[in-house]
Image (cartoon, helix red, strand yellow):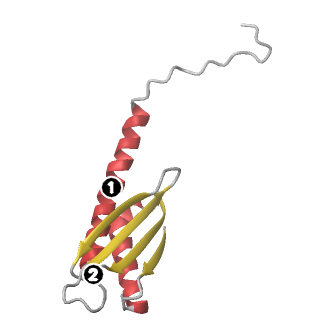
Amino acid sequence: MQIQINTGHNIEGGKMLSAHISEVVEDTLRHHSEQLTRVEVHLADENGPDSELNVIRCAMEGRLKRHQPLTVTCEAGSVHQAVDEAAEKLDRLVEHTLGRLHDEKIHRTDPPILNYPANGNV
């Protein structure tokens, strides 16, 4: 599972922040690492640097093999809290989606595919 981190220009932290985010994402989504090809993390300070009230927005996009990307967002008072909560949300969404896909596969009602000879004679 590849982890890509994008931060807004108002988010500081550099390599230490990237390492922390990678660790949180890896730990939280470890049991889905075989199904996830990539997780993108986007962080932004919604109120800007001059505001007294911090609102950090974390959006995470998980890309499952052979499936549309799954996206969650979370707003919190700190980067760490936003990342933790978004990772938990993504974990629940991946779990739900994989369960639904598994159930659909088991309960398919497609008619069986019949193998007819190539010349069309039955």
Q: Which disc is residue 28 wearing?
A: none
In this rendering, the answer to whether 105 lies above or below 55 is above
- Rendered residue at 35%/45% (across/down): 99
Query: Is 34 above or below relative to 82?
Result: above
Assign a secondary structure to mark 1: helix
Estimate the spatial distance between the alpha carbons at disc 2 and disc 1, rounded to whole Å: 20 Å
**Residue in the image at 45% along x and 78% along y:** 5
Residue, disc 1: 93
Task: Give how far across and how far down residue 3 sits, in percent.
Answer: 47, 73
Query: The residue tagged with tag 2: helix, strand or loop?
Result: helix
- From the top left corner, tell me how far across and down residue 72 is, in percent: 34, 62
- The residue sitting at 25% across, 72% down in the picture is 75
| Label 1 packing within 10 angstroms: few (<14), some (14-19), many (20+) | some
In this view, the residue farthest toward the right is: 119
Eyeballing the image, is 105 above or below 34?
A: above
For disc 2, the neighbor class at 10 Å (few under 14, some 14 to 19, many from 20) is some
Residue sitting at x 43%, y 91%: 15
Query: Mark 2 — residue?
Result: 80
Considering only order in the chain, which callout, 1 or 2, is on the residue closer to the N terminus? 2
Q: Is residue 106 above or below residue 75?
A: above
In the figure, residue 39 lies in which quadrant?
bottom left
- Residue type marked 2: His
Q: Is residue 42 left or right of residue 52?
A: right
Q: Position of residue 94 (x, y in %)?
A: 36, 55
**Circle 2/circle 1 CB separation < 8 Å:** no
* Quadrant (top left/top right/bottom left/bottom right) for the C terminus: top right
Is residue 54 or residue 4 the one in the foreground?
Answer: 54
Identify the amino acid type marked 1. Leu
Q: Nearer the viewer, residue 78 or 114?
A: 78
Q: Position of residue 111 (x, y in %)?
A: 51, 20
Query: As drawn, is 119 to the left or to the right of 63?
Result: right
Quarter of the image where one finds residue 20: bottom left
